[in-house]
Image (cartoon, rainbow, N blue to C red):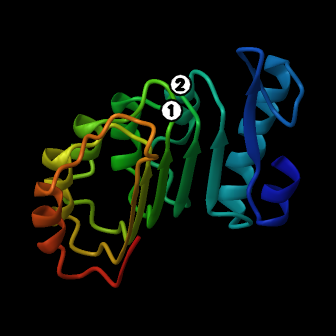
Amino acid sequence: VAMVMRALGAWAVGVARNSITVDGIQDRQYVNAWLAKQQAALRSGEQSHVYFYETRNTDTLLQQFVGNAAIERLTFELTDLSDDGVQIIAELPRIERLTLYGGRPRVGDRGIGLLRGHPTLTTLKIVNIDVTDRGLAVLQTLHHLQHLTLCRHEFREKLLTDGAVEELRNLTGLVKLN
């Protein structure tokens, strides 16, 4: 994954055996180096995407990016990002694309609610997170939202009802709904 992300202009941080790792190396020194490299690449304009994969203590890692105006894309895949961590994302001034994919605990309605009225979010992918019809209602306040992906694998508990269609119907600026 890390090699693929490097090719795409982002660096991945992952977890193995419940300790934070970067590119498979389990050492706090390397995590700090990864964070420093991310910050430097963002400052220099070399990248605008930060990818978190199977991380633990993700909210703590994310605190290193508070208010970073260089971040335009964030991906969280199988992390422990919580609703509280979404508050940090909501305060990023230029975030355009956000992917929230599963994890434990999963982001829920409260976390999605923290994105209320975000002025630059154009793409939102929410996969296997704990959002309900009520959580989707906040998407109406994302006036620049053009691309939305909603997915919850069939083996998981169903949280969305037919009422979700009513919420989605109000998203008149959508260009693409997956």
Under tag 2, what secondary structure?
A: helix
Residue 144 placement (x, y as % from top left): 28, 75
* Residue 143, quarter of picture: bottom left
Given residues 50 and 55, the one toward you in this image is 55
Mark sitting on residue 63: 1
Residue matched to label 2? 60
Residue at 66% over, 57% down:
42
Q: CA distance from mark 1 to mark 2?
A: 5 Å
Under tag 1, what secondary structure?
A: helix
- Describe residue 149's horizontal placement relative to residue 23 as left or right: left
- Describe residue 147's horizontal placement relative to residue 39 as left or right: left
- Give the crowd class for mark 2: few <14, some 14-19, many >=20 residues within 10 Å: few
Residue flagged by tag 2: what amino acid is it?
Thr
Q: Eyeballing the image, is 112 above or below 17?
A: below
Residue flagged by tag 1: what amino acid is it?
Gln
Residue 115 placement (x, y as % from top left): 27, 51
Q: Are marks 1 and 2 in contact (CB under 8 Å)?
A: yes
Residue 127 placement (x, y as % from top left): 45, 50
- Describe residue 92's horizontal placement relative to residue 60 as left or right: left
Given residues 85 and 100, the one toward you in this image is 100
